[in-house]
Structure formats: C-alpha cells, structure tokens
Amino acid sequence: MTENAQRWSDVCSIPLTLEAIRALHVPPSQYRISPKNYEAHIVVPGVSIAGRLYVLSGACVKTVGAWSVSLGAGMFADFPEGDYQIEVCAEQGVQLVYVWPIPAQ
C-alpha cells in the first residue's frame, strides 16, 4: 500500500472548503474541479487520469492498481492514473472534491 495522504491543516490555515480548493488551483482554465457525494458503504468504480482528491467530510479508501490511500475529513492525496475504486467507509457517506490538471492543447 502506498500512501501520500496529507492533512489540509498542515499546509493551509483556512478551513477546507470547495472555495478554498478553487482558490488554490488557479488559473481555473487549467484545472477541472469536480465535487462528488457518495452514500455510505458503497464502492464506486471508474477510470481517471492522475489528479488530487480532497475529502470534505466522511472517509474513504481510493485504490488505483497497487496504489491505495485511506482518507478522512480534512485530508487530501495525489493519485495516479488508471482504473480505480472508491470505497466509502463513513456511516454518513463522503463528500469529495476531485482536481485534475487540464492537459495543454
């Protein structure tokens, strides 16, 4: 298992919100920012380019191949590209924000 999870509070003094994430990733034309809400105890499969995942509330485990990270509220991690799954661990579900760089044209 590879973890690169970080606590938002260790790198930023303002609360972790969607607005704070948007302010960090500028200019907006270079990033896709996508908030998602998932219900408790589900597994969500997908495929993605490399990016960053923030957890606003709840908890989850994101797995991409052999790479995996556990994240709780107020945490974030950079993830590799590939087929993935998000396993929601929190009883109340999870609020996530995905951030991907938009490739240059």
Image (cartoon, rainbow, N blue to C red):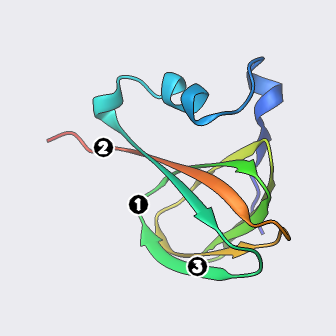
Q: Quadrant of the N terminus?
A: bottom right
The amino acid type found where label 2 is placed reads Ile
The answer to which of 83 and 55 lies nearer the viewer is: 55
- In the picture shown, does residue 29 fall above or below 52? above
**Farthest-out residue, top:** 13
Task: Please name the amino acid that badge 3 sits on.
Answer: Val
In which image quadrant can residue 72 be found? Answer: bottom right
Q: Is residue 9 left or right of residue 20?
A: right
Give the tally of numbered discs: 3
Tell me the CA gap for discs 2 and 1: 10 Å
For label 3, the residue is 44
* Residue, disc 2: 102
Residue 105 location, quadrant? top left
Residue shown at 71%/32% (left/top)? 16
Q: Residues within 10 Å of mark 2 (few under 14, many from 20)?
A: few
Q: What is the x, y in percent for residue 88?
A: 74, 72
Badge 3 element: strand
Q: Nearer the viewer, residue 101 or 55?
A: 55
Q: Earlier in the sequence, mark 3 or mark 1?
A: 3
**Identity, as a three-letter code, of the amino acid under mark 1:** Ile
Q: Give the residue displayed 72% in from the left and 61% down from the top.
A: 94
Element class at badge 2? loop
**C-alpha gap between disc 3 and disc 2:** 23 Å
**How far apart are the two marked residues, 3 and 1, measured between alpha carbons?**
16 Å
The residue labelled by disc 1 is 49
Which residue is painted at 78% across and 17% down in the image?
A: 13
Give whichever of discs 3 and 2 has the lower sequence position: 3
